[in-house]
Amino acid sequence: MILRENALLRREVKRLTAENARLANAAQENVRLRQLLELKQNTPLKTIAAEVISRKPSNWFATATINRGRRDGVSPGDAVVDFRGLVGQIVEADLLSARVVSITDPSSAVGAMVRRSRSSGVLQGQASDYLALTYLPKDADVKVSDVVVTSGMGRVIPKGFVIGRVVRVMRNLTTGMTTALVRPSVRFDEVEHVLVVKRAKGQ
């Protein structure tokens, strides 16, 4: 009798543990969706909500597929963001889906600037946990912990989206250039829901 009751109790504990995990996951997703909705409401440009449905396996998941495509207004070149900042850019769009390349991909290059000082350069993917903010002048006002945002230069990625924080500054006296290592604010392999940001007309 006692053994049977213990078995029943163990099954109930297992069921409750699974249910608690499910509820915690749902609560976290609800928070993320609310934050994404807030971002959508505060972004003056047209945005399209989308969900990541697959990723290309790699060390950093450099590309992913979302469940929105040309039928929804998604086009190559559109920026992709979540509530933490810039995720990447649309590189291909089919009728019902589109492919996103991460800002960490070596092929990625984005106009960026230090939010505090407005020093501008080009942010390049490194296929690693870090990005490189390059083409800064040798006397660029950039410091560790500075926030880096999109600059809008080139009129491809809209201005003002957070990219990450500076973790190291390197000044090359020979070339007269400064490079800053930037840790992205978004881990591409953790992204589930995003906004595709359309460029303003005329851009």
Image (tube, grey):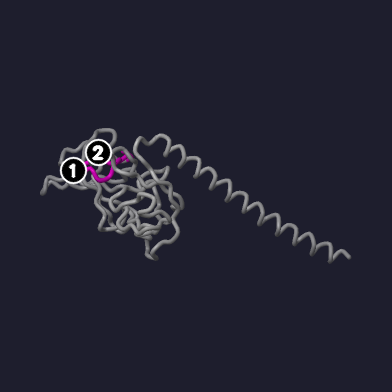
Residue situated in front as seen by the camera: 168 or 162 = 162
Q: Where residue 142 is drawn, which disc sits there?
A: 2
Quadrant into which the C terminus falls: top left
The residue at the point 28 percent across, 48 percent down is 181
Residue flagged by tag 1: what amino acid is it?
Leu
Residue 155 lies within the magenta run:
yes
Find residue 100 and report its horizontal and vertical position in percent.
Answer: 35, 56
Q: Is residue 5 left or right of residue 76?
A: right
- The span shown in magenta is 145-158
> Residue lying farthest front?
71
Dot 2 or dot 1, earlier in sequence:
1
Find residue 32 and report its horizontal and vertical position in percent.
Answer: 50, 44
Residue situated in front as seen by the camera: 158 or 125 = 158
Residue flagged by tag 2: what amino acid is it?
Val
Residue 95 lies within the magenta run:
no
Near mark 2 (Cα within 10 A), the count class, few <14, some 14-19 or many ≥20, is: many
Cα separation, mark 2 vs mark 1, equals 9 Å
The residue that mark 1 highlights is: 136
Find residue 1 and report its horizontal and vertical position in percent.
Answer: 89, 65
Q: Are marks 2 and 1 in contact (CB under 8 Å)?
A: yes
